[in-house]
Amino acid sequence: MQDLAPDPLDLDAWLGIIEAEYFSGFVPAGGGALKIAVGDDALIAPAAVRLARLACDHGLHTVAIDAARIRLHMPQDLFFALTRALPWPVMTQAFLERLFDENGYRWPRPGQPLSRAALAEALGIAPPLLGSEINIWLTRAIWHDRAYALDFRSAMLALATAALDPDADAAAPVHRWLQGEKAPIPAPLRAAGIGGRITRANARAMLISLCHWVRACGAPGLLVTLDARRLYQAGAPPEGELRYSPAAVMDTYEVLRELIDDAEHLPGLFVAVLATDAMIGGEPRRALDHYDALKMRVWPDVRPGQGQNPVAPLVWLGA
């Protein structure tokens, strides 16, 4: 690559731009984006922590993913990492409270799960009548929303129904399915309409569904930080960590390329890829230069002298 070393962009300045341009407006408005920040190894962890703090300040859910632990080249594993980190009971409760509010009823005890019977008593409505109304609301809000994949719709209906019983045993298999459990699909899931596991083939549709669901549950969006340092370490990894072949690194670039191309369909998703200079000038078989499809989407072709555009898809950071 030409012009490998522009003047580094100050980390504080970059974080200020991300907060002002993305966390304060673009992401809550439903925008999706992926940014790559390249810098010294010592900057990666602090950058991830500070991004998470800023995102939390603006109400976003935050998930930190390390390539040493999660196979970034497998899109379903990326999805599973998100689902394991998200607070599903809290999200389901927030969804139900918003659902009631949108239909003219205030949840009697905000933040506290209540059964249909308890809700009927608190609201002074006959249980059969309220139960029928709730079923209509859930059908309209989830089942008829084509932003969700079919299996995802079935799963969210099952979670909402379990929260209204309440029945933790009914929710548990849905959570395990969302998180990638490899056991055969249990009978309760089949009865709920969930037909198969989440794989590479349907991971994209599930991620799109998840982004819509996060917003339906009241959060403006989701920050995902990807610590990509492991991609550029060719030797044997420490015990318990993953090793990436050059082919796996290229597959990871393909996953990132797909996230960029799908950004308009991923409302509220902000992905920050944090990598060292090895991404640019390291081993040729692992470097960004070896995968034109991603390079063409992120490489900053125009710079003000040796400076940088702070909102470019790829930036070089300094302390």
Image (spheres, grey):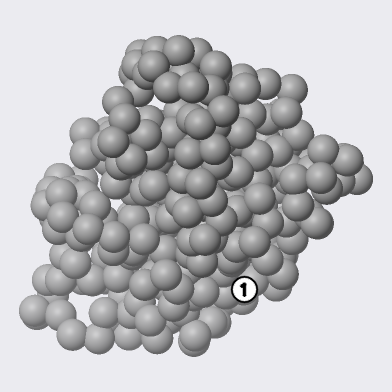
Residue 135 horizontal side relative to residue 93, left or right: right
Q: Nearer the viewer, residue 256 or 12?
A: 256
Q: Position of residue 265 (x, y in %)?
A: 42, 70
State the image coordinates of residue 1 (x, y, percent, origin top left).
39, 83
Residue 288 in sight here: no
Q: Is residue 121 above or below residue 205?
A: above
Quadrant of the rendered structure where residue 177 is?
top right
Where is residue 87? Give x, y as percent.
Answer: 50, 30
Q: Rate crowding at label 1 as few (under 14), some (14 to 19) or many (20 or more) other CA atoms within 10 Å.
A: many
Q: Amino acid at mark 1?
A: Met
Q: Secondary structure at mark 1?
A: helix
Closer-to-camera residue (296/21): 21
In this picture, residue 303 sits left or right of residue 270: left
Residue reaching furthest to the left: 304
Q: Residue at x 72, y 69 (%)?
A: 201
Q: Quadrant of residue 53?
A: top left
Could you tell me if residue 16 is visible in this image? yes
Q: Looking at the picture, tell me which residue is in the foreground, 64 or 183.
A: 183
- The residue tagged 1 is 250
Quadrant of residue 61 in the image?
A: top left
Q: How many marks?
A: 1
- Write the residue at 33% across / 40% down: 103
The location of residue 168, given as percent across then percent down, is 67, 21
The image shows residue 217, relative to residue 251, as above or below, that is above
Q: Residue at x 81, y 45 (%)?
A: 191
Q: Quadrant of the C terminus?
A: top left
Q: What residue is at 34 percent from the left and 55 percent from the top?
A: 268
Seen from the viewer's position, the closer of residues 276 and 312 is: 312
113 lies left or right of 313: right
